[in-house]
Image (cartoon, helix red, strand yellow):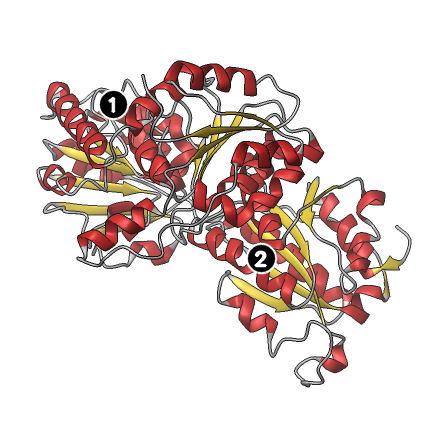
Amino acid sequence: MPERPLGAQISHMLKARDVDTIFGIPGVHNVELYRGIEEAGITHVLARHEQGAGFMADGYARATGKPGVAYVITGPGLCNIMTPMGQAYSDSVPMLVVSSCLNKGDLGMGRGRLHEMKDQEIAAACVCDWSKTAMDAESAYQLVDRAFGEFASQRHTPKHIQVPIDVLGAVADSAPEPRVTKTIAQCQEATSVADDLKKAKKPMFVFGGGARTAADSARAVMKQTGAAAFTTYAGRGILPEDEALNYGSYLARPDSADVIASADLVIAVGTALSEVDLWRDNLGHTAKLIRVDIDPASLFDAQHADETVLSDAGAFLENLLAEIDGPMSKGWKAEQVAKTRARWRAETDAERPGIVPLCDAIKAVLPADTMYFSDMTQFAYVAKEVIDMDHPGHWHHPYGFGTLGYALPAAIGGKVGVGDQPVVAIIGDYGFHYTMQELGVAVELGLTLPIILWDNGKLKEIEDSMIRSQIAPNAVIAQNPDFCKLAEAFGAQSAAPKSIEELQDALRSALKADGPTLIYVTPEIHD
């Protein structure tokens, strides 16, 4: 390979590591990163805001399983993408952000340069796994390979590499060939866990997002052991909806703790059991708790596991299956599981009336392999409990960091990644204000993308929270535009269904459209 400016070499290096798409915005400081994009054969998606670029990279990564990559400029560009970086960190998403920074001689000098920050490396480090400065080509190449090596072998987290402007423009030799990296945290044996399972009368599994790629093994374990199970929101789809002993994604229901307390063995696989999984301090177990995770931090948290297994979920479940002699008969009753799930579904409907029937209507129309991207909105809070998933890793939500405006740009990134596979976005009226400009990207790319916009005219969840806290609601209502006209002004199609049947028709049409369709839904929609 010939010598090139380092910015161009980085794009070629990424291409050699299977990167086919980069999301970002060029600026005067990072133009050298754009020198080699087309030559390397990489598609660049121009976002309308760096926050959008970051969410697109996140959505692409969640949809494809490959790292999402974004290019941004020094200072404000990096600051704008830090929210998506924080979201990716909390939700274990592999993302690589490459930014420029000031010339080597200007770093930390406080000279009032364009886009200058006191220390943008440290700022970015607050919302990602690590943030490093490459002061020369060799350092840049080592950091890129470190990032991709960790993506392949550890818990998925975002990384940030910044390169000084003068280093990006300096001529450099080509990057080294890709290295082969394999997952290193593998379960060596599961005999003791299998022994515990054989002795237990009512064992319980909790499957999290870290077990998504091990769905086949998880389903086989369920069939062989007679255990009951919950899935976290991120783990939905690991178990089929017709699994008789699957309590579903109702883990955050307060009295799910009572169900878990009735188990005499609990095995949590690939889940942090965090606040946003449980919405309470404790899982609720009274029996032995075994934690299985690739991240040591999850094994030694406040849930106080009795036994820990540092392992990839797939390796652990495969080893566990090998230790099980045959089908086990346990004390769980399918009728009781079904009755409990029905009660929790009714509670969900009572808490936020009118949304459950819409969820059922959407599920009935959308293909089984549809990928959903949802936002922080009451519609999604209901949907991620009551819409059963046919496949794991097909519902993506800003769980941990909990940012508004995620769904639209993330769905764009996801759709770019999966191509013809159906993708739908679910977003609230207020959240849409955060990133509505990215609708232009969906139009520009001609993406077939239904966007369900739930407009209840306010920040309803916040209003409800204020009322529960005996605070007179204020600052919860904002002036909304005519969303359908706005979508049409961008060049998108729109629909405003007045009934559930019209909603289903709008979805069918949107899945065939040559471009995005905004489907405007209000609580006044009727049967």
Nearer-N-terminus badge (2/1): 2
Which residue type does callout 1 highlight? Gln
Measured in 3D between alpha carbons, the distance from the residue under mark 2 to the one under mark 1, in whole angstroms, is 45 Å
The residue shown at (16%, 39%) is 256
The residue shown at (26%, 30%) is 248
Asked whether 364 or 321 is in front, the reply is: 364
Which residue type does callout 2 highlight? Ile
Which residue is the site of mark 1?
224
Say which quarter of the image contains residue 4. Answer: bottom right
Which residue is the site of mark 2?
81
Describe residue 337's horizontal placement relative to residue 508 as left or right. Answer: left
The residue shown at (48%, 14%) is 505
Label 1, residues with CA under 10 Å away: few <14, some 14-19, many ≥20: some
The spot of residue 63 in percent (x, y) is 53, 35
Asked whether 402 or 158 is in front, the reply is: 402
Instruction: Determine if residue 165 is in view.
Output: yes
Asked whether 482 or 236 is in front, the reply is: 482
Say which quarter of the image contains residue 138. Answer: bottom right
The spot of residue 518 in percent (x, y) is 54, 30
